[in-house]
Amino acid sequence: MANTYTLIASYAATGSVANIDFTSIPATYTDLCLVASLRPVSGGFDGCYIYLNNDQTSTRYTSRVLRGNGASVTSFVGADTTKSYAGELTDNTASTFNNFQIYIPNYAGSSQKSFSVDSVGENNDTTAYQVMTAGLYNQTTAITQVSLRIASVNIAQHSTAYLYGIKNS
């Protein structure tokens, strides 16, 4: 990574966990970049979601999602405004993890916060998803917490996440 990336925090799941939270994020950087390798504990395909500042209030999030599965592509507006869709995870292939990169520019500024997500659900099968999300967090307060959760099940052991601060210098 470029010299301007500084590791703020890292997380490695030592067992099954409900969510991964990065809290007390300092306002000393220009942008944030979260890189994660996740796996659900069970259940086939399941959605992964982003929460900013642990905010689950209705109408806080809007997003446009582009999702491909190897056979077709769909585009849709994120239906849940209490969180933002980050991608489709699977546990169908043993010991295989799904990868994400979430980028949040100007996270400490006083305007609404945009973000983008690029994710891929690794799967040695006929269906695997690649998802790109363009999102908006409709709040002007600085982002001090970023959380990842899977919709229906826990995050599996050995999942990892790394939060980087990026300086524009």
Image (cartoon, rainbow, N blue to C red):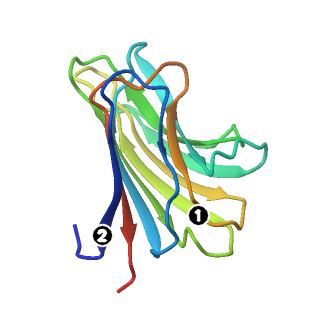
Amino acid at the residue labelled 1: Ser
For this orientation, the residue located farthest to the front is 24
The residue at the point 55 percent across, 53 percent down is 145
Give the vertical position of 100 relative to 94 (above or below): below
Amino acid at the residue labelled 2: Tyr
Between residue 67 and residue 20, name the one nearer to us: 20
Is residue 8 shown to the viewer in this render? yes
For this orientation, the residue located farthest to the right is 58
The residue at the point 38 percent across, 44 percent down is 119
| SS at badge 1 | strand
Residue 9 horizontal/vertical position (percent): 36, 54
Residue 164 horizontal/vertical position (percent): 36, 61
Can you identify the residue that label 1 sits on? 114
Can you identify the residue that label 2 sits on? 5
Residue 100, picture quadrant: top left
Query: Dividing the image into 4 quarters, which one contains the N terminus?
Result: bottom left
The residue at the point 31 percent across, 68 percent down is 6
Is residue 74 shown to the viewer in this render? no
For this orientation, the residue located farthest to the top is 43
